[in-house]
Image (spheres, rainbow, N blue to C red):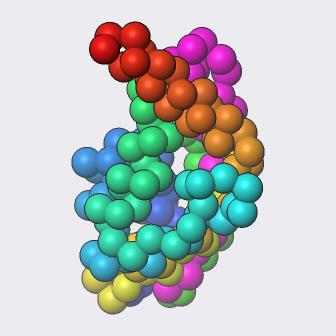
């Protein structure tokens, strides 16, 4: 048996990435997560599951209708005998403001000796995500102001 998750196990992990309660089980804590992108405020380096969850996951998912999120893992390279893997994924959803959301992304991951993701580096269309998050957060602020 290989010391690290194999391609099929990695595919299962990343198919569940929109469900934090499930995906977080696959993450080591502390974790080293880098979201690549200089043009938006979600990009950065996160050193714990909670920091990654609060800074990235919560904000991205809040902008989408959760029931519409579909993630397809298209390719996994590595894993098994290697602590490193690359995961190519494709996500579709509908924003809370009925705009289509289509995202292709690649994650480079390193597994620890327990088979948990210890390091993750994400590459995706940061401008697209940023526009959905900004729209949601600005409209949410406006709704709060209107209620006051």
Range covered by the magenta-colored residues: 83-103
User: Which residue is nearer to you in this view: 90 or 37?
Assistant: 37
Above or below, comparing residue 100 to residue 22 in the picture: above
Q: Position of residue 72 (x, y in %)?
A: 58, 41
Q: Left of 68 or right of it: where is 28?
A: left
Residue 26 seen anywhere in this rendered image of the structure: no
| Placement of the C terminus among the 4 image quadrants | top left
Q: Position of residue 130 (x, y in %)?
A: 65, 42
| Placement of the N terminus among the 4 image quadrants | bottom left
Number of marks present in the image shown: 0
Quadrant in the picture for residue 93: top right
Above or below, comparing residue 134 to residue 107 in the picture: above
Furthest toward the front, the residue is: 148
Above or below, comparing residue 45 to residue 131 in the picture: below
Q: Name the residue at 72% across, 63% down.
A: 38
User: Which residue is nearer to you in this view: 3 or 97?
Assistant: 97
Q: Name the residue at 45% across, 36% down.
A: 61
Q: Is residue 102 magenta?
A: yes
Q: Which secondary structure dominates the residues rendered in magenta?
A: strand
């Amino acid at each position: 048996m290989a010391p690290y998750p194999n391609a099929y196990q990695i595919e299962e992990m990343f198919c569940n990435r929109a469900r934090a309660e499930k995906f977080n089980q696959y993450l080591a804590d502390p974790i080293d997560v880098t979201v690549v992108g200089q043009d938006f405020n979600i990009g950065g380096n996160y050193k714990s599951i909670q920091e990654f969850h609060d800074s990235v996951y919560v904000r991205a998912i809040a902008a989408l209708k959760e029931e519409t999120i579909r993630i397809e893992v298209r390719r996994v390279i590595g894993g098994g005998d290697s602590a490193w893997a690359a995961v190519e994924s494709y996500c579709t959803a509908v924003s809370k403001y009925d705009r289509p959301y289509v995202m292709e992304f690649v994650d480079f991951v390193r597994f620890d000796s327990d088979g948990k993701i210890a390091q993750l580096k994400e590459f995706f269309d940061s401008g697209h995500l940023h526009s959905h998050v900004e729209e949601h957060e600005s409209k949410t602020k406006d709704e709060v102001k209107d209620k006051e």
